[in-house]
Image: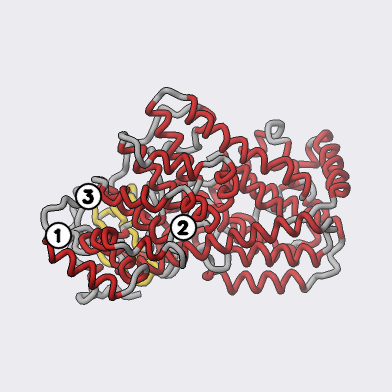
Amino acid sequence: MAAPVNKRSDCWRTPEVHKHHEQQRVCISRPKYREGRKAKAVKVYTINLESRYLMVQGVPAIGVMTELIQLCALYGVVEEYRPLDEYPAEEFTEVYLVKFQKLTSARAAKRNMDEKSFYGGVLHVCYVPEYETVEDTRLKLQDRRSYIARAARNRAKEREHTETTQESPTSLDAATSLSKILTRHEGTFKKENTREVLNVSHHSEFPPLPLPPQEHYSFRQKSYRRIVPTEDKMGTLHNAFSHLEQEQVESLGANATTSGRDRDTEGRLGSTPVSGVQFLPRIARLENRKRKMEQSEELAASSSGKNEPLIGPKLPEPPKLDMEDESLNTTVSHIRSTMKQVGSVPDLKPVEKKAKARRRI
Amino acid sequence: MRKNESAEAPERFAYLQSLVTEFQDTDSEEAKEQVLANLANFAYDPKNMEYLRELQVPDLFLDMLTEDNENFVEFGMGGLCNLSMDPECRDIILQSDGISLVTSCLSNRREETVLSAITTLMNLATPTTRSQLSEPGILQCMLRFSLAQSPRLRNLAAVFLQDCCSEEQVRQAQQQMQGHQTAIGIPLPKE
């Protein structure tokens, strides 16, 4: 990672203070039904406000630039960075400019780093599209357009798919739907491509997966989808959307890879849905315990850069749930039988779970 | 899948519908602003496009462009910027005479509104609308923006001039501008 000051490029000139760098006042007058989990300002997010350039304010001036860039690098490749010495900073803090290779990385970094404490300071992270070159801006818009077009095509395809087939949950179906989900994100999440390809092939390595594990597989996705977004510290609203999408890819990846490893536990995994899908209120205390665990694991998770580790260690826990409570066991079997009847395909559930979680933002 | 689809998709739809209803029913300017911003942000997610189309939100946003409240204009324009990325929404916007409504926002005082307008116009570019988008008035506007202080405005205008019209058209617009020398004096949007 180099931090050369590119004199030719317009983007490393003396910074100006723009209004959109400031944190806006949060709105406190929203009625309950459209209240998010996090207080936010009344603001509309468009692609124009996003950028792969981030400005990080509030970095304690104690020589932690390396640590800051290492932290940033957890969310994607950092192409360039430099301190913005000329930018007005609060006393004893520094301001940095960080240029990511991809917008999705910048988005993840902003979401995860903004308003987080860092060596005793609280970071304020914002997009700084004014550092883009004309070409940066063009590519950003093109990427966004093709992402939306692809999403539209996939939706149309999915609709056809749903109408024409009553799929049975064979592993083949799961594999195709998995790849379908993955292709939907291919452009925006190129970074994960290698992993995705790996996952798909990984998945098809086990074509004879029996039916019950398939159900669990989808259940697990379901429950994570439900839980993870709820627990997650959301960034801005639009971040939240894509965050969920990203999460989906990642949790899928984690599921695919762990399904081999944790096969012996799969039989018990059927209890997972209970925690996430329908009986949230009854096991609220268990949820809380989980939440605490997740929070403590987040540090560990960030050390490897992705959310996967978050998912891995959680797997063994659910079985305990259904040991504890007889009615929960009843519930599990009830859900199992319902699932058999429905005989559904896993791919749409994640989408809809996302839908649900998203709605609650 | 079928079960889920019938159980959950309507929830999303119903929520968006309740927003639209609140927007229409409320007398509170503040609530309207909040709901409008909500809807515009929902338009960022491709999953909502279909529902927003069904609820005629593209037309709702277009209506906002002629409001006096500048927040309404900004949020409506932002929503259109998000929606117009989707080809089907784009076509709806075009059918509702979107180009002229959006073009009128190029002279808005707020930079964010102008930026959304430029991006929206680029999104509205199709083989059939290209001639409309490259008319001298718009190009002269972009030429002025390309000289602006604000890098975001400058960059977006540059992309527009490079991608949405021919060099010849730009040259012609430049000549016309020199003809009656209006480049100086027209206020640029403030941030």
Query: Helix, strand or loop at disc 2?
Result: helix
Number of labelled discs? 3
- What residue does disc 2 label? A108
Please state the horizontal and vertical placement of residue A11, each as a whole percent of the image: 25, 68
Foreground: disc 1 or disc 3: 1
Type of amino acid under label 1: Ala
Q: Callout 2, which amino acid?
A: Ala
The chain ID associated with circle 1 is: B
Q: Residues within 10 Å of mark 3 (few under 14, many from 20)?
A: some
Q: Position of residue A292 (x, y in %)?
A: 57, 43
Left/right of residue B2 with respect to residue A236 in the rendered view: right
Question: Residue at position x 63%, y 58% from top?
Answer: A251
Which of A294/A30 is in front? A30
Q: Which mark is residue B189?
A: 3
**Residue at the (52%, 63%) spot, across then down:** A147
Q: Is B169 drawn above or below residue B52 in the view shown?
A: below
Give the labeled residue for mark 1: B183
Q: Earlier in the sequence, mark 1 or mark 3?
A: 1
Using the image as rendered, state which of residue A214 and residue B51 is in the foreground. B51
User: Camera-side residue: A329 or A253?
Assistant: A253
Q: Is residue A323 left or right of residue B143?
A: right
Q: Secondary structure at mark 1?
A: loop
Q: Quadrant of residue B163?
A: bottom left
Residues at marks 2 and 1, CA–CA distance in whole angstroms = 41 Å
